Image (tube, rainbow, N blue to C red):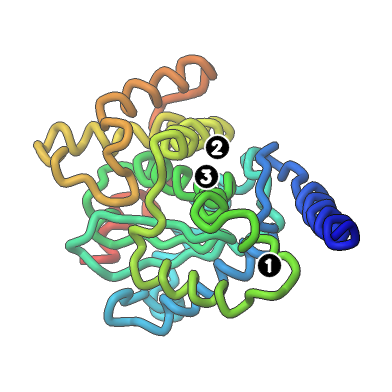
Amino acid sequence: MKKIIIKGISTVLLLVIIVVSFMACDKNNNIVLFSIQNDIDLGLQVSQEIAADPTTYPILARSTNVEAYAYMDAMRDAILNSGQVVYKDDFAWEMHIINDPNTLNAFATPGGYIYVYTGLIKYLDKADDLAGVLGHEIAHADLRHTSRNLQKSYGVSFLLSLLLGENSSELAQIAGQLAGNVTGLAFSRDFEQEADAQSVMYLAQTGYACNGAAHFFELLEASGQMGSMPQFLSTHPSPDTRIVDIHTKATDEGCDTTPITESIGNTYADFKLLFQ
């Protein structure tokens, strides 16, 4: 009996040692057992699942939409070069435009694969509005919100098996689930607030109005469409609260809220015309 007890204690201690060894804070000072490589691998698998389903995700080809992607890439690069994106050099930050004029949506996977619907692009008025949304989505990936959700959902033992290379098929399964239903990328009230605040921080170091993310909510309010919120900017917390919080964050940071001045022939209006 004594040997069995000692063996049991040794096993527990071994698990504790393994857990502690992996429980270092990430670059955002969050304890995440899901590794950076897991984020990268999961994001790649989700992007491959999405690419394999053009009916659900009719992604515009870069080869025939050079101007559109150049505009989006420049906006993304301005945010990535803000000095505020901690995984700038780790994640893919690959931009995709989904040709669906009836959908007001955008989302980002782990590892920085970003998807924006043409319906959202056409709905917004200014480059700053889209930059605010893009900053919000980059923040979800950079703050590792999906990984932190998975950590809560699957628990320590599952994540340890991933870290030890014992559950690669499960990772592929998760990727399929996320690709098949992007509502799996929905986030809590705290995560949405984090992404809103981080969007302000990103844009503060660019030429875009740092409170750009708030303009989307204001546009919905003005058009009476607040009841039909897209998934990517969920109603938790309420849109009114988020408008106030974003403007307050901009005031606290003392950052510029003046809309960006774009060059003639390369304005947001010109960009929107590409999808007519």
Name the residue beneath numbered marker 2.
202
Where residue 70 sits in the image (x, y, percent)? 48, 63
Q: Label 1's element?
A: helix
Name the residue beneath numbered marker 3.
139
Q: The disc labelled 3 sits on which kind of residue?
A: Ala
Mark 2 vs mark 1, foreground winner is: 1
Mark 3 vs mark 1, foreground winner is: 1
Q: Label 2's element?
A: helix
Indicate left or right for 242 with 151 as reference.
left
Name the residue beneath numbered marker 1.
161
Q: The disc labelled 1 sits on which kind of residue?
A: Ser
Q: Are marks 2 and 3 in contact (CB under 8 Å)?
A: yes
Indicate left or right for 155 with 35 as reference.
left
Indicate left or right for 158 with 6 as reference.
left
| Gap between marks 2 and 1 measured at Cα | 35 Å
Q: Earlier in the sequence, mark 3 or mark 1?
A: 3
Quarter of the image with the C terminus in it: bottom left
